[in-house]
Image (cartoon, rainbow, N blue to C red):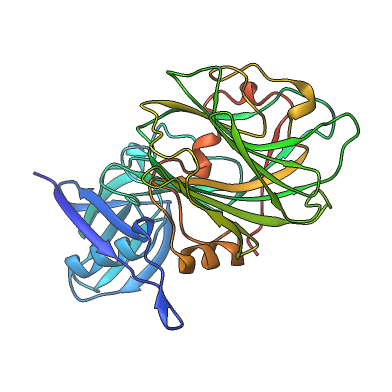
Amino acid sequence: MPNDIFVCFLLIIAVSSVFNSEDCRIVNWRFPAEHKALQGHVIATVSVQTGSACETACHQEPNCVSCNFNRENLTCELSNSSDQTHPDSVVDAPGWTYNAFENDCIGRSCPPGTVCQVGYGGLGEYRCKGQFIAHFPATLHVYALKFHPLPLINVFSVSVWFKTNLVSGSNHQTIVSIVAKDYPKIDAFNIDLRGNGIRIESNGKNRLISSGELRDGNWHHMVFTWSAANGDWELYLNGTLSDSESGFSTGFSMASGYLVAGHEQDSYGGGFEKNQGFYGSMVGLNLWSRVLSKSEITHLAKSWCAPLEGDLVKWRQFYPSDVSSLGGIQIKAQRCE
């Protein structure tokens, strides 16, 4: 049977540490092939003493999916491809041993400017390394980024970076909308910008958090957390707690939900009105099935390239397999800062 290999790297930051399962790599090694080597896809060459050390070096290089080891000159070649995608590149090579793990990136779609890396997030999983940004058209529109179905939710955190301006004809600009399948005509949760604040709505009740005008053309970071147990919620802006309260949608849960970024739903996955759309740029929207810690929120607010992705929904999962469904939304590579 192929071997499951687990390698985890812990990033320690100052006094505290931020652990992310996406930094752990689990892969399925296939059977090694003696006197074979993969040519034409080598991304790095290192000196090692054993074949197992060569495999470890492949684990530690996120873009590596196969390796060649020469037992005579103790050379290890790391490749970003394998016989699964380039079978003709495997050649006879006396003294070499070729080994590869299952390339779970095959058939997966990553947004422009990102690279698919195998084994991050669990066995059979992958991540799209890099960052992309969604530009919503600065006119009245009905375009949105969508994800469904959401699993059972009775506690969650949502994090997002956004940049927008006031737009004539818009009552408010929606950042996040969640509708439960059992209650398609009710906003399970809706977060939008209006007036001089952020408005949080759930099950017909709402809270307006004074923040000053955020539709100012500058980048802002927002985190909203909520728990059904006591209806506790918190709203963080640019890493600072803006407001918090208890007794909001206490006891509410949804068995299945529809998540939309950039528009408000008036029905399950639809019912968009042009004057409720988001106008500008959005990046790094992630959803967790827990309340994020203050240290995690601080870390996320430092950069949209912070290596912390949601366990419920990852930003890359908003990128559709059918790009024609993006409509007027433009997806572009974004340099990390």
Whether 278 is drawn above or below 232: the answer is above
| Residue 192: % across, % down | 68, 39
Name the outermost residue toward the front. 247
Residue 26 visible to an observer of this rendering: yes
Q: How many marks?
A: 0
Q: Residue at x 29, y 70 (%)?
A: 75
Name the outermost residue toward the bottom. 15
Residue 116 visible to an observer of this rendering: no
Q: Residue at x 70, y 25 (%)?
A: 143
| Residue 290: % across, % down | 38, 50
Q: Residue at x 58, y 29 (%)?
A: 204
Whether 247 is drawn above or below 93: the answer is above
Whether 70 is drawn above or below 259: the answer is below
In-front residue for pair 179/260: 179
Question: Viewed as shown, does residue 264 lie left or right of 1?
Answer: right
Whether 69 is drawn above or below 222: the answer is below
| Residue 276: % across, % down | 74, 29
Quarter of the image where the N terminus is located: top left
In-front residue for pair 123/1: 123
Image quadrant in which you'd find residue 277 = top right
Name the outermost residue toward the right. 168
Quarter of the image where the C terminus is located: bottom right
| Residue 97: % across, % down | 20, 57
Question: Viewed as shown, does residue 72 lie left or right of 20?
Answer: left
Question: Viewed as shown, does residue 153 lie left or right of 317?
Answer: left
